[in-house]
Image (cartoon, coloured by chain):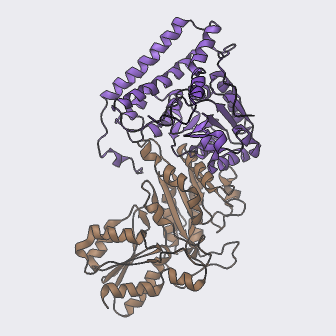
Chain colours: A purple, B brown
Amino acid sequence: MSNTMEIRRDPVDCAGHDRALLLRMFRKMLEAREFEEQLYYLFLTTAMPGTMHQAVGQEAVAVGVVSALNPDDTITSTHRGHAHCVAKDVPLKDMMAEMFAKQEGSCRGMGGSMHLTDFNKGMLGAFAIVGSGIPIATGAALSARVRGSGQVAVSFFGDGAVNEGIFHEALNMAALWNLPAIYIIENNQYALSMTVAESSAVPDLASRACAYGMPSLRVDGNDVLAVHEATREAAKRARAGEGPTLIEALTYRIRGHARFEAAGYRPSEEVEAWKKADPIERLAAGLLARGIAGEDELNAIRAEAEAAIEDAIEYAQSCTDVQAEDYLSYITAEN
Amino acid sequence: MRQLSQAAAIREGIVQEMRQDPSVILLGEDVGKFGGAFHITHDMLDEFGAERVWDTPISEAGFTGLGIGAALTGLRPIVEYQYLDFIFCAMDQVVNQAAKIRLMSGGRAKAPLVLRGPQGATGRGAQHSQSVEAWFMHTPGMKVVLPSTPYDAKGLIISAIRDDNPVLFVEHKLLYGAASPGGGKALSDTAIQAIGTDVPEESYAIPLGTADIKRQGSDVTIIATLLMLHRALSVAEELAAEGISAEVIDPRSLAPLDVATIAASIAKTNHVVVVSEDVSRAGVSAELVATINDHCFYDLEAPVQRVAAANTPIPFAPASERHVIPQVDDIRAAVRRVLSI
């Protein structure tokens, strides 16, 4: 399969899907988008410390995958992980407080944007060394098997991560032992400045699964239902003891790699074309086309998502600043 | 009391923990049907089955990561490296992931993980002989444990398994006291003392971070780990014949380090020699000297002497390996220097 999948702009086909699920997906994608848009503004005004990596334009992958999982299924995320956390129901207030380095943050202000974690929600961690979460999710899958918990473990990673050796080591073991794991390549087409074609000898990334006898497929990563369906099938197989699946979701990173990185290495026509394939707008069009929701209802959901982020910011700003020596409690666990 | 080799003592500690805690699993190369390259895990596959004893592919980074993921989700994995030299394949997983996840998650995650394997110079050339502990002593978030006797090995491995942090458990090939199935004859060393070989059959735990005074003395303190502890003891015995009384301390764990026991000894002897098999530059011995200077400077009557491996990859030729690794003669000379005798 070529890497230049046609950029689809058509409405997401919502036929036959549960209305509540569809509206929830819409809301989650909006929350993820608004969370990052507000972060961008907050960084501009220097109200927020640190750095961040935006997944604007990629929300359908996080929401499509997680909406097909059970609440106790586990995920690992990456440096570009806000949307995964939103999808996994990590409280927005906890996430925002973490961004502001507050004691009430999801990681008590010790992790920051690149390490959001919430064990209550099955969010095992955001691992910001490219590819490093892949074996950790695989270990969670092995653990689910040993404990007989019936859980599935999902690892999100980018197109750059498939060229780390750890990708090979982990997928080989998962396939060898039929572990209940799902691997999601969020192919946003750029590893910082490097395109997939410039960094992978075979740019059809899903095809790598054949080396492990693992089923794989490429889906339109800006079609939240396509992602959801693929993940649902993979989770069913995993829970049935039939082993792991590799899913390549083709999407696009609308912003630069990090914070204010301008991404001048991309043709502006390409960026503009992908902006018109916005996954949130494609879902909205699908909802309208099938009469599942009217414009007023969608606008109300948009307003709710914006209000939720506004509340989270207000809450975070009212939280307690991390004290300089707080870290001393977190270096090692004392039994 | 019953005598055990160090290999058998480590094995017994692991087996006893696996019997009483179903969350303890093993991962590593040849740990199952082969029983481990140094025979530590023999018969465990038969007793505990393939869901708890995982024979892995040669994928050190990968199976270390699997251990971390399993540790984060309710298991207590023990990850074996066939030689500790191979842990460097997994440095990102150990240093960036396992060691940091507790802090990164604000204390919400724990990674109860034991990373264990053999090290030490035994004529195998540069990539199967080095001592790795300094790399991990340098890694906050990790504990580093090094047993020198069978008794300590059993009590420490049990504590390591029960600990909620990633623990590097360093074993020395020459101290195993048992033949490796691939290697034929048992490895040994003439300096190895018959100490701590009485090993109780019942389970017991030695708290991590507690040093042990292996020999009481009043003139000089020698701090040493693993094989070097045995060489230090043989030097202490020789010097006793000359009327020099050496106290020999085994820290047993470098992180955390039992500074109180070391400081109390130095307050008494006022003279210190530190001995470690890893290289001297930015090594364990360097850190111990710095720690002693921080805590005990005004108790010292002479500069701390250190004895450590030369700053070189370990050469194969036996004569060169002996030259690089601290020998009894080097330790004896350091004691004489510190005492100006």
> For this rendering, which residue is in front, A154 or A194?
A194
Q: Nearer the viewer, residue B139 or B22?
A: B139
Residue A330 placement (x, y as % from top left): 39, 47
Q: With respect to residue B49, does B313 lie above or below?
A: below
Residue drawn 32% across and 67% down?
B291
Q: Dividing the picture into quarters, in which one does residue A62 lie?
A: top right
State how many labels appear: 0
Which picture quadrant has residue A230?
A: top right
Relative side of A204 to B98, left or right:
right
Residue found 57% across the figure and 56% down from its top: B90
The residue sitting at the left extreme is: B298
Q: Is residue B4 visible?
A: no
x and y percent of residue B120 in the render?
55, 73
- Determine the residue positioned at 72% across, 60% down: B33
A40 shown above or below A280: below
Question: On the rendered structure, is B336 left or right of A84?
Answer: left
x, y percent for residue B219: 30, 84
Is residue A240 in view from this perspective? Answer: yes
**Relative vertical location of residue A46 with respect to residue B61 in this rendering, above or below:** above
Q: Nearer the viewer, residue B176 or A92?
A: A92
Provide residue B72's location: percent of width, then percent of height. 53, 44
Q: Is residue A334 above or below residue B122?
A: above
Quadrant (top left, top right, bottom left, bottom right) of the C terminus of chain B: bottom left
